[in-house]
């Protein structure tokens, strides 16, 4: 039996097929939890927010029109929910940086060879470098962080990011450039010194 596409499932949900909704949730739950976990840095919060994302999808079923890829639309719901959650909890105690489980954090280090550092200096362990990258990413402005996570860990193209984050492609490219530069600037002193954690101010959006 041919697996139903996301669009077919969404149209079935729109027509009242509750079973199709369960299939859709099971298909995409892990990716949405991973996104919200990496963004919020807390597993329980991520699970709760992912549940809220799918509830929003279900409530929007009658308005759904297959004008774009379903995953692009789904990520847009998740992005908006994540950004809203961060805004709502600004005054609350913050959780530690997400561990970026299952991903190679060092991929965030942009073109170190271009800056005269082909590899970390002696005394800088890979895990130490990852910790610094995690901290740098966690300190990015909200939209920079979201764009970087979606691009690097979820493989969204500029076009998909443009639709997901409702920004122009040039604006998305600029956002990613600033995000990578902020990460590079944050970890560069650590790489050059081979010593302890870096302090620094939050980058500008």
Image (cartoon, helix red, strand yellow):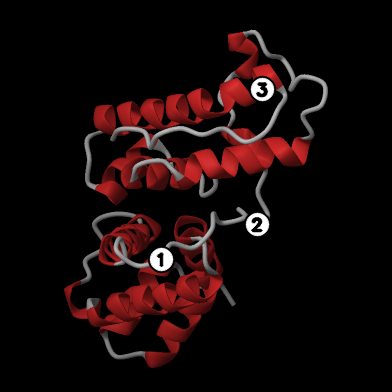
Name the residue at 33% across, 61% down: 86
Placement of the N terminus among the 4 image quadrants = bottom right
- Quote the CA–CA distance across marks 3 and 2: 23 Å
Q: Is residue 57 above or below residue 21?
A: above
Name the residue at 27% across, 86% down: 15
Question: Around disc 1, counting alpha carbons within 10 Å, would you say few (fewer than 14), some (14 to 19), or many (20 or more)?
Answer: few
Placement of the C terminus among the 4 image quadrants = top left
> What residue would you read off at disc 1?
93
Do the residues bearing badges 1 and 2 touch, measured as CB atoms within 8 Å?
A: no
At which x and y percent is residue 99? 62, 55
SS assignment at label 2: loop
Lower position in the chain sequence, tag 1 or tag 2: 1
At which x and y percent is residue 195? 70, 28
> What residue would you read off at disc 3?
191
Name the residue at 40% across, 73% down: 49
> What residue would you read off at disc 2?
101
- Image depth: mark 1 or mark 3 in front: 1
Lower position in the chain sequence, tag 1 or tag 3: 1
- Quote the CA–CA distance across marks 1 and 2: 22 Å
Question: Around disc 3, counting alpha carbons within 10 Å, would you say few (fewer than 14), some (14 to 19), or many (20 or more)?
Answer: many
Q: Is residue 23 above or below residue 194?
A: below
Q: Is residue 204 above or below residue 85?
A: above
């Amino acid at each position: 039996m041919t697996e139903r596409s996301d669009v077919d499932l969404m149209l079935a949900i729109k027509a009242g097929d509750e079973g199709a909704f369960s299939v859709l949730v099971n298909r995409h739950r892990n990716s949405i939890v991973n996104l919200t976990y990496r963004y919020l840095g807390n597993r329980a919060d991520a699970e709760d927010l992912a549940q809220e994302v799918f509830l929003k999808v279900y409530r929007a079923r009658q308005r759904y029109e297959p004008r774009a890829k379903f995953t692009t639309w789904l990520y847009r719901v998740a992005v908006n929910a994540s950004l809203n959650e961060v805004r709502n909890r600004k005054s609350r105690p913050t959780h530690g940086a997400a561990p970026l489980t299952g991903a190679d954090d060092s991929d965030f280090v942009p073109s170190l060879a271009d800056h005269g550092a082909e590899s970390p200096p002696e005394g800088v362990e890979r895990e130490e470098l990852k910790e610094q990258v995690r901290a740098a990413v966690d300190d990015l402005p909200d939209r920079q962080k979201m764009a970087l996570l979606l691009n690097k860990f979820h493989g969204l193209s500029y076009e998909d990011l443009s639709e997901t984050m409702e920004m122009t492609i040039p604006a998305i490219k600029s956002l990613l450039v600033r995000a990578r530069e902020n990460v590079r600037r944050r970890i560069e002193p650590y790489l050059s010194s081979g010593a302890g954690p870096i302090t620094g101010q939050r980058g500008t959006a």
